[in-house]
Amino acid sequence: MSAPAILIAAPMTGSGKTILCLGLLRALADRGHAVGSFKVGPDFLDPAFHARASGRPGPSLDAWAMRLATLVELLDDAATGCDLLIGEGMMGLADGAPDGSGSTGDLAALLGLPVILVVDCARLGGSVAPLVDGFLRWRDEVEIVGLVFNRVAGPDHAELLREACEAAFSNRILGWLPEDPALVLPSRHLGLVHPDELPQLDRVLDQAGRLLAEHLELDRIVRLARPPSLACLGPKPRPLPPLGQRIAVARDAAFTFAYPAVLEGWRAAGAELVPFSPLADEPPDPRADAVFLPGGYPELHAGRLAAAERWRAGIAAAAARGAFVYGECGGYMALGRTLVDAAGEAHAMAGLLPLATSLAEPAPKIGWRRVALVGASPLGSEGARYRGHEFHMARALAEPGPPFVRLADASGRDLGAAGCRIGTVAGSFVHLVDREAD
């Protein structure tokens, strides 16, 4: 690991971490830096925005769900060919599992990453000082090297904030950013709207880059970055065993939430991945011995999926010939019989599992999960353990049949059996992230 890194964090969610990270990536890339990125926590969307800003893909680093070897290997891969890495934290700096594990601060402490704290000052004056002071004292092993004040009303407000911090830590202030409605990224029920659906995104990123270059000390930010303090020797970790030797992977606007680390782990294990698009009515490769339907937004495209006869016939044929067909979250919903969209209209899905789901009456479930397999499958033997997360709004109207997994939350509280498996077709609402550490 040679590339220095810095981590963007905040006291709470909604403080402006994402736009600061994207603006830094674009501004530093425009200055000629080979800049890469990573996102803390379970996240599919923010890394896609990072890639648009920098031109380089970056991983999600989940300190709760991933083994240390996996974290370090992913960070190593992200640093390849880069002279700087910018990381974006999740939620607030201290927010994680109930015991604090898995937080942005936890990852910063584990990997020795310096932190820049971005503070939403829209409703703050002199109170910014005790707020920041509390975070500076929070954990000795979490080093906050810089401060950025966001949503500042103007120069007078900025000066008030600076004066409040003058005595104790004004040397950490890297600049301030004004409120700019043009930099607000649209969102929906599972987070930000995917960047592929935002035709004006590059213009927003350019504007964010210019704003940061004007208001922040970019050269100083580069100097504050430093290499992570851990290195990992040995073979590349493989988060999940491959589902087969030739895996058909659904990839389109309805099935976007697949972790690159999982897919690359399958390739590293010798599997061939063959993409297909259910929305384009493409069946999975008939030579595939496994089919993977990742999460995404089938509820936004349920009518098209219901009308796509070739993909439904193709996935039924895969199951009939004994291929392992596996779905996570949105992919699991698509394997069911019926999906009711937010307007209350029912749509026929693949019909391979006795499952009916609905978005008409949302039932949000968000959180990390400890996972144990019920019965043997290509993912492992009976009782094989993983870590993962749930993040969905769907309600299961019917989920009969043998369960696929048993779940516990991040505190270890038993959540019971979940998912469904019929023959070689299986799935659940959980996104699997990594094997349980030994």
Image (cartoon, helix red, strand yellow):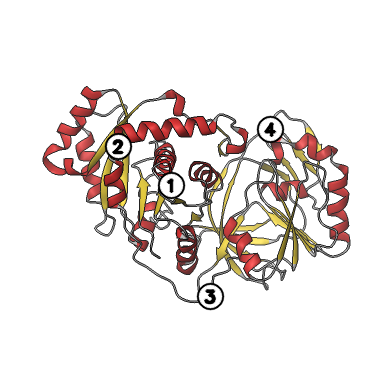
Secondary structure of residue under mark 2: loop
| The furthest residue to the left | 167
Separation of marks 4 and 2 at Cα, in angstroms: 45 Å
Up/down of 294 relative to 245, above or below: above
Question: Considering only order in the chain, which callout, 2 or 1, is on the residue closer to the N terminus?
Answer: 1
Separation of marks 2 and 3 at Cα, in angstroms: 40 Å
Which marked residue is nearer to the observer: mark 1 or mark 3? 3
Amino acid type, label 2: Leu
Separation of marks 1 and 4 at Cα, in angstroms: 29 Å
Question: Considering only order in the chain, which callout, 4 or 1, is on the residue closer to the N terminus?
Answer: 1
Mark identifier at residue 90: 1
Up/down of 256 relative to 272, above or below: above
Question: Considering only order in the chain, which callout, 3 or 4, is on the residue closer to the N terminus?
Answer: 3
Q: Position of residue 181 (x, y in %)?
A: 43, 23
Question: Considering only order in the chain, which callout, 3 or 2, is on the residue closer to the N terminus?
Answer: 2
Mark identifier at residue 235: 3
Q: Position of residue 352 (x, y in %)?
A: 82, 52
